[in-house]
Amino acid sequence: MSVTLHVHGAARTVTGSCLRFEAPGAHVLVDCGMFQGPKTLKALNHEPFPFDPASLDAVLLTHAHIDHSGLLPRLVKEGFRGAIHATPATIELCACLLPDSGHIQESEVRMLNRRNRRRWRGREEVRPIYGPADADAALEAFQPVAYGEWITPAKGVRARWWNAGHMLGSSSIEMEFGDVRVLASGDIGPDDGTLHPGPEGPQGLDHLICESTYGDEDRPIITPQARRAALAALVREAAERDGALLIPSFAVERAQEVVLDLVLLMQRGEIPATTIHMDSPLATRASKVFARHAHGMEEGEALRAALHSHRLLHVVEGAASRKLAQHKGFHIVIAGSGMCDAGRIREHLKSRLWDPSAMVVLVGFQASGTLGRLLEESAPRVRIQGETIEVAARITRLEGYSGHADGPELARWVEARRPIRGGIFLTHGEPEAITGLAARLGKQVVQPVLDSRWRLPAGGAPVPLPAPANARRLEPEALARPDWHNERAALLLGVEEAIEHAADPAARAALIARLKAALLG
């Protein structure tokens, strides 16, 4: 059977996962994720889909994270009428994530339009990608599928889901298009995760599409016990500093893992017993899903108990969150988003980054161009919502929470899928990560760019096909690097610093005059 693969997302970047397969009589999408990171990349969320949503027969969803599921409401809004197949846990988590995403779209657009009206008279108003009602409509299209169960989502296509070990409900999806056998990895978890068994998958494929988020890294093995010991040391340090301990966290899986560790450490007397503020309504809703599914997880009963601990306080109302951002003394706050590019964590960072007694602990991947990456790379100043903030707080990264396999683990997982007769497509990674994993795998590796397309033969190498005219939305070099918005912010920070540190008023006036001449002529 002739099969064509279109790579519409997560090509040389870690977000926006979207793979489209065309075969005679069948048109199937694997994931429909939102782009995150620099504004140039996020702008792709507003552009037209490079295909007609109404022409799709089905969507096969690997897991609930927004970079894999976040554009499903828009897909349904613009004409998709098929089924969205996913594991039951993924469906429950999407019922939390997608309406929340719709609220965020509407809220961010309201703020942007208000800011534009103040600054740029006459500029057209921006419309949200979708709203909560669109998310609710998309949820009606979901159909549950069990691990290991073969289904027929479209004519001549069979598919089944394998545990990917990345998060609750996460999957790799095996597809058969007649005699062509393909596996889409989704996100692959580490060999020794806290809550889930290691990733699985079939053997003997024609083609494999594999994530590569940490493909260039060889991380030391960090057991849950070692991770908790490192977290305990940071909590004790934060208590001694008598300041805020801020933990930016993804609302699904990561927040629940951090709560589990904090509660266990308090029960053992290894850290001060204090309130853990969960300042994320989404994480609160997701925690209920995790509690319902705890029986199937490793350390599940301990997780369920932690999520019901009297030490855990859920901050729901916005007013309570703003009040918490002004709280004095030692306290622990877990807030979204994990990359600090949205959500309530930004208000906490605005209130705390200047404070030497505060501590920020990063527990997840920070994509290029995000505020989290800037903090991770020790930026002395950052801009948040147009305001310049001096960074005096202690910024540190805590390893051991990643839901992604590292380079050696990915290589072993790929090796266990062999023989692979055709190509190994590396997606969902920044260029350095893809290059690192490619070096581990050797031959057969393909590094697709955004909107590239390939013919996938049975038993042979993939064949690149020319892209349709004007099909490519962004050039590869624009995907995984800071964009002009980041460069403008860095320029403004540099100008402010140069003016403030001028030797005397005369030097400051001369500098301002030169800037005016250079910018205004």
Image (cartoon, helix red, strand yellow):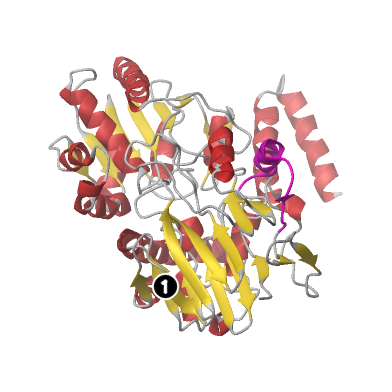
Residue placed at 47% from the left, 63% from the top?
70
- In the rendered image, residue 95, in percent from the top left (x then y), is placed at 32, 65
Q: Residue furthest left?
A: 310
- Asked which secondary structure carries label 1, the reply is strand
The residue depicted at 43 percent of the width and 34 percent of the height is 363
Q: In this view, does 456 lie above or below 489?
A: below
Q: Does the magenta stretch include residue 411?
A: no
Question: Does 287 sit left or right of 186 as displayed?
Answer: left
At a point 44% along the width and 50% down the height, the residue shown is: 164
Residue under the point 60% across and 81% down = 52
* In-front residue for pair 259/170: 170
Residue at the far right: name it: 521
Where's residue 425, x and y in %?
66, 53
Q: Give the range drawn in magenta.
A: 429-449
- Asked if 495 appears above or below 41 in the picture, the reply is above
Report the amino acid beneath label 1.
Answer: Ile
Closer-to-camera residue (388/147): 147
What residue would you read off at disc 1? 151
